[in-house]
Amino acid sequence: MLDFFTIFSKGGIVLWCFQGAGVKESFTGPVNALIRSVILQERSGSNSFTHERQSLKYKLDNEFELIFVVGFQNILTLTYVDKFIDDVQLRFRDRYKNELVQKGALMLLNNSFEFEDDFQRILREAEESSRTRSTTYMRAFQESEKSKKTVKSMIETKGGDKGKEQGGKKSKSSKKEPPAPEPAKVEKPSPPGQKTLQNGNQGLTQEEIIQKKREEFIRKHTAGPTEKPSGQRNKQTKVFPVFDCLCMPGFSFYANKHLVCLPPPPPPPPKKGGGGGGCGWVKGWVGSKSLSQEDMEPVLEKMKEHLIAKNVAAEIASQLCDSVAKKLEGKVMGTFTTVASTVKQALQDSLVQILQPKRRVDILRDVMEAQSQRRPFVITFCGVNGVGKSTNLAKISYWLIENGFTVLIAACDTFRAGAVEQLRTHQRRLNALHPPEKHGGQPVVQLYEKGYGKDAAGIAMEAIAYARNQAFDVVLVDTAGRMQDNAPLMTALAKLIAVNMPDLVLFVGEALVGNEAVDQLVKFNQALADHSMSEKPRLIDGIVLTKFDTIDDKVGAAISMTYITGQPIVFVGTGQTYNDLRSLNARAVVGALMKA
């Protein structure tokens, strides 16, 4: 029933693998997809992954840097897989512990791991336990207690309760029973040598009198109020506080106005096995301690609150902390390191890994490659209303012109009033900065527009054809802003991208957004996938983050957007001029994010 099971190190060395009978396809494709999409992207909070028609379950062993992966068809429901992979991990660790302790890839390659017999035995036990698990059925009505009740039994129960209630109450006419006589107290003879109290303080020494007064004073001022006889009149009792600050060390102040010297308290007994007071705190800092979920939970909770305060979406912050916990659980801490520092460093590394793209977006190189194919390079901009799509399109136009390319702007926002005029103003200003006289008499920027109320997909297609005929290097397609919940406009955007197949689809989002970033990107990607006509639809390829200069250190939107799409942030807008366009520095962003 299992397609494959593999054990490999985090360095990519396969230690042992199993392939099911009749399975001809290699397991390298699903496992590589798991590594690229989950492990390298810090999404290991969940232990399951789906690749095409296969379901994968995996478990990380952070102590020995191992990964256990099992794969099976996703139409199957295997309830024993989670326990099975845990049993395999424990057995493999116990059997090859000495070999795994030896660090280095060469050591792992030289060792042979014969694990077939143990694996088959654990698999048989797991399958048998799954088959023998008893199925619970619903009880029939005749088997229930309700079916045994009759009208007669219900009447008797009700009458019995009444009788109990009547019998439980005491009758007024019933005579009170006399109380049982108390047993006579027998005075025990005092042991010889002990003085008895006669007529107050007679027969007592001075020390015993002081001790007696001390006990009376403490009993009088510390005991609770006692009940007074009903015949006496209640009087308010004054309570005098006892001030410990009036007493010098070794003395106590009592009601008889005497200072009595008390013996000093005995020293506390030494702790067993402490090894000295100087070494106790050192032991808590030195390493050789495996991290557990309980150790990390308070630290991760604080980290989660810190990320949310820095504008990271709450769902993303929770998933990040879960991923870090899975990554560190069972890992041995280093020497002189605390749990907080270890968790913080792991979270920083995860954030840097998220912001670094899994594929590099090099627009200049791609434009030069399109030039060699004698076609324009097409970039489409999309996003919600008011985030700055047209302004950042003009900034990217200026950046391309500075690098020696010609640009055609396609005005496909045929909905918003003034959209075409805004682009025409940008075209005029850019041509003023780079006059045609310096470029062979040809304008470096042109605007292709057909007015308002037209089909945006058709205008984009005509603009791309015009750019091919006029030998433009880049086509920048401006689209109308739309909310992610507007189904007709999202359908129109998906149609524009599906028909024209641009080389790059950039989502323009603002850095001020928090939890809304998750909803925007998920629904934009979902709309592009639902309304595409191909099996592999075009989704968002990159992100342009605007208004980055207005957020100080609350840079969490960058993490949220990159984590949702898995795509890089290509540009960051940092101002209102054409020069205010930057590439993202991942370590600088993470440093600002982790700053207290």
Image (spheres, grey):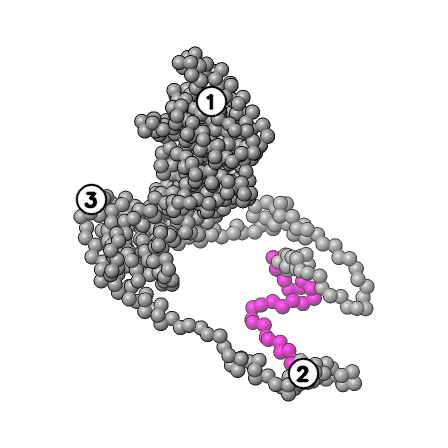
CB within 8 Å, label 3 to label 1: no
For residue 158, the mark is: 2
Q: Is residue 586 above or below residue 21?
A: above
Position of residue 63 in the picture relative to residue 232 (left or right): left
CB within 8 Å, label 2 to label 1: no
Span colored in magenta: 183-209
Position of residue 342 in the picture relative to residue 452 (left or right): left
| Residue located at (41% from left, 43% from top) | 537
Few, some or many C-alpha atoms within 10 Å of disc 1 (few <14, some 14-19, many ≥20)? many
Residue projecting furthest to the top? 437
Q: Which residue is mark 3?
A: 106
Separation (CA) of disc 2 from disc 1: 94 Å
For residue 446, the mark is: 1
| Residue located at (33% from left, 61% from top) | 84
x and y, in percent, of residue 505 in the image: 43, 35
Viewer-proximal residue among 498 and 246: 498
Q: Is residue 454 magenta?
A: no
Separation (CA) of disc 2 from disc 3: 82 Å
Which element type, helix, strand or loop, lies under badge 3? helix
x and y, in percent, of residue 521 in the image: 48, 41
Q: Is residue 88 above or below residue 100?
A: below
Separation (CA) of disc 3 from disc 1: 60 Å
Q: Quadrant of the N terminus?
A: bottom left
Which quadrant of the figure has residue 345?
A: top left
